[in-house]
Amino acid sequence: MTALPIEPVPSPADDTERPRGPTWRLRRGINTGDRVYRAILTMLALALPLLLVTLVGQLLVSAWPSIRRFGFHFLWSSVWDPVAGVFGAAPMIFGTLVSSLLALVIAVPLALGVAIYLTEFAPKWLRAPVAFLVELLAAIPSVVYGLWGVFVLIPFLRGYVVPPLRAVLGWTPFVSGVFYGNSLLAGAIILAIMIVPYIAAVSREILLAVPATQREAALAMGATRWEAVWTTVVPYGRTGLMGAVILGLGRALGETMAVTMLIGNRHDIGLSVLQPAYTMAAAIANEFSEATTSLYLSALFEVGLLLFLVTVLVNAFARLLIWRVARGTAVGSRAL
Amino acid sequence: MNARRLRRRLVSGLMTSLVGLLSFLAVLALVLILAHLVAKGASSLDWSFFTKNPVPAGQAGGGVANAIVGTAIIVGVAALIGLPVGIGTGLYLAEYGSGRLGWTVRFLADVLNGTPSIVVGIFAWTWLVKPMGHFSALAGSVSLGVLMVPMIARTSEEMVRLVPHSLREAALALGYPRWRTSLRIVARTALAGIVTGCLVGVARIAGETAPLLFTALGNLNFSTSIGEPMQTLSLQIYAYATGPFEEWHRLAWAAALVLMGLVLLLALVARWAIRQRHGATR
């Protein structure tokens, strides 16, 4: 659907002799009001591209001292010493990536399960309410997730999850060290819960867009209901589902408050999920107001710039994948 | 042959139950969080919680009156900034959005929708806090307003697009100029939907914390001046939850319950309004 190409139809008055004023304006097709209206709307619409440009420009300018000083070393070095004025962001980049990927490992099966159940198997009366409840997870403020994580999730992990995890996987480096509570594991789990609604909502729209004939053809060939879903419907929506997952990744990478409260904020690279870690967003949240030197501040701006560029790229990629399936729709952009 | 058929049926049944179970787990997460909020927060909700300001650390009592008022002011000003731009962008996308600029803006809106809010926070800090030399509620409102724009733009666009073409054509056929058709016929028909989108957008930013950390900052006292630091519920929850006192934790739960109630109320009203107009569309 695009804007109507129809202009106001010239009135019959055009052919007859009438006062010139209004007919002249009608014949022009576009009157002054239309031009003004369009100009105003265009200006408002230009706000977003302008915002993006100034945002990137501003971050780049603010981060420039740090970029010049440390170069690419900023990405590999794990020294973060405000006193000596040496900054390397490797541990937070590592923590951001690992916590988000762990969150995806947990969230993707869950969200895909929800989407498949809601489009294929759930009784009709159950679909809308369950979809609404799952989407409500996206309405819970990040800081409330953090609060819940600190006082409910971490005690639960300490009591019921970490001991069995240790018993089974304790010999690997991934589950070693003392569990203080705030850890990569806690951060990843809260992230997983937070991104499930996004992945589920987009996946659901993608699966709904799969033509019913695909399903029916598979069933007619004698497939069971699950086989019809798994061998025809899901592969048909593959691209879009991929987009949904990557969209979830984008959300996870930039999530701030809940992760800051749960991940432990330790500037170190460790393999164990029971140990504290750090993320880029958490570093900004924690240290920005304490940054005393201009180089320190600049380093934090560089972290912000990196975070922004990465999430924009990830989101753009996800959008292109989703748009290929559900062209131009605002899937997952709706707040709920 | 029969054994194989049985196995396939078994797999089908098993997987069906599995996805059902996963859906149950997702809903369970929501129920658990809401239940804990009520269980730990409800008992602290009394008159003084809503009417008193925070007391110094260690003392009992006190409330979050300043945070409630602060949330209302900051979110209100943010809406004043974000809604006109967002709705205008949405109208542009629906009316003139078929060209290259339309595609670009639509794409950017979708991409910016998922950007980390904390980055917008440091952006507002550079433009408003640093030049002014002190933290202010206004800077917080600006960052929240910026966050609203992409979301509001996309929902407004969708709502305007739902208006039947025949309405527009009828108005144009009567010789109505395009701008009046757009504003008085199309936008007016879509008004309920647009308002709903705005409600949801407001609900979403009401819980934002990260962009406020370096802009509104928080304030232990009652303040209604948007040039000064101001407290919000979300900042209060963060400060209390990460603090060492049992009393603070109690207040954090209560504040979280209030914030969640506010967000849920807006979401439910929006949901109800959409149903009234469009039936169960999704």
Image (cartoon, rainbow, N blue to C red):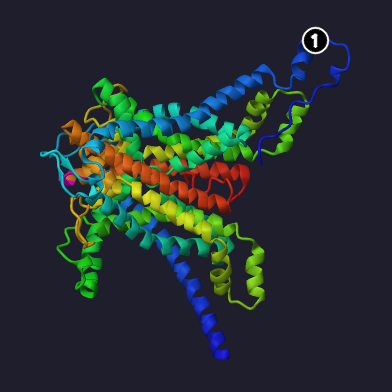
Q: How many marks?
A: 1
Give the residue type that dot 1 points to.
Answer: Arg
The residue depicted at 39 percent of the width and 55 percent of the height is: B30
* Residue A210 is one of the magenta-drawn residues: no
Give the labeled residue for mark 1.
Answer: A20
Residue B208 visible, this angle: no
Question: Residue B2: x and y, percent?
Answer: 57, 90
- Secondary element at tag 1: helix
Please identify the quarter of the rendering in which residue A53 is found.
top left
Question: Residue B213: x and y, percent?
Answer: 27, 35
Q: Which residues are magenta?
A: B242-246
Question: Residue A29: x and y, percent?
Answer: 74, 22
Between residues A17 and A212, which one lies in front from this camera angle?
Answer: A17
Between residues B227 and B59, which one lies in front from this camera angle?
Answer: B227
Residue B128 visible, this angle: yes
Question: Residue A156: x and y, percent?
Answer: 25, 62
Vertical placement of A107 versus B21: above or below? above
Vertical placement of A171 versus B155: above or below? below
Relative horizontal placement of residue B21, taking residue A263 as reference (left or right): right
The residue depicted at 58 percent of the width and 31 percent of the height is: B92
Vertical placement of A264 versus A117: above or below? above
Q: Please, what is the dominant secondary structure of the magenta stretch? A: loop
The residue depicted at 80 percent of the width and 23 percent of the height is: A10
Chain of the residue that carries numbered disc 1 in the rendered image: A
The residue depicted at 39 percent of the width and 38 percent of the height is: B205
Please identify the quarter of the rendering in which residue B163 is found.
top right
Between residues B264 and A280, which one lies in front from this camera angle?
Answer: A280
